[in-house]
Image: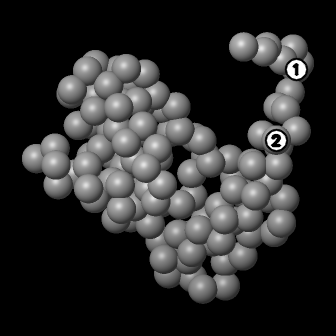
């Protein structure tokens, strides 16, 4: 293993975040337009908001709770506005399945069907 010492994000993380922020800006604009019923809302480049979701641990209950939150956020159109996810213990089980299998939306639906 290699440890990188630094006080900021590594170059590849900066690149990934910048790419994600382009997607976030479009999603954030649409989310706010729908929420406020105002199609004139526009977010200027560089003014995107970094949104993070932190999920707690707790085994199977945390897994189910995290799944419920992700499903709700997806239904609201909010999930694509998120830049970072963090979790602990059971909530990472949900995150691992949802984001380790490729398309998160399909993975969320698949996990939701199989966990019921």
What is the number of the mark on residue 7?
A: 1
Tell me what residue is drawn at x 21 percent, y 27 percent: 61
Q: In this rendering, would 111 be left or right of 9?
A: left
Q: Which residue is mark 2?
A: 12
Asked if one can make out residue 79 in the rendered structure from this viewpoint, the answer is no
* 7 with respect to 35 (left or right): right
* Residue 84 position (above or below residue 112): above
Q: Quadrant of the N terminus?
A: top right
Q: Which residue sits furthest front?
A: 1
| Rendering quarter of residue 73 | bottom left
Residue nearest the viewer, comparing 2 with 107: 2
Q: Nearer the viewer, residue 86 or 5?
A: 5
Nearer to us in this view, 115 or 24:
115
Residue drawn at x 47%, y 71% as measured from the top left: 35
Residue visible at 84% across and 32% down in the picture: 10
Query: Could you tell me residue 98's position as x and y percent?
Result: 40, 47
In percent of width and height, residue 51 lies at: 61, 46
- Classify mark 2: helix, strand or loop: helix
């Amino acid at each position: 293993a290699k440890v990188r010492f630094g006080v900021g994000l590594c170059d590849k993380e900066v690149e990934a975040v910048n790419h994600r922020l382009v997607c976030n800006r479009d999603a954030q604009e649409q989310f706010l337009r729908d929420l406020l019923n105002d199609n004139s809302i526009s977010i200027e480049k560089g003014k995107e908001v970094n949104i993070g979701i932190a999920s707690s641990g707790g085994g199977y209950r945390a897994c189910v709770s995290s799944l419920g939150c992700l499903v709700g956020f997806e239904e609201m159109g909010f999930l694509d506005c998120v830049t970072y996810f963090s979790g602990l213990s059971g909530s990472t089980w949900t995150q691992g399945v949802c984001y380790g299998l490729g398309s998160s939306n399909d993975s969320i639906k698949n996990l939701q069907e199989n966990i019921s």
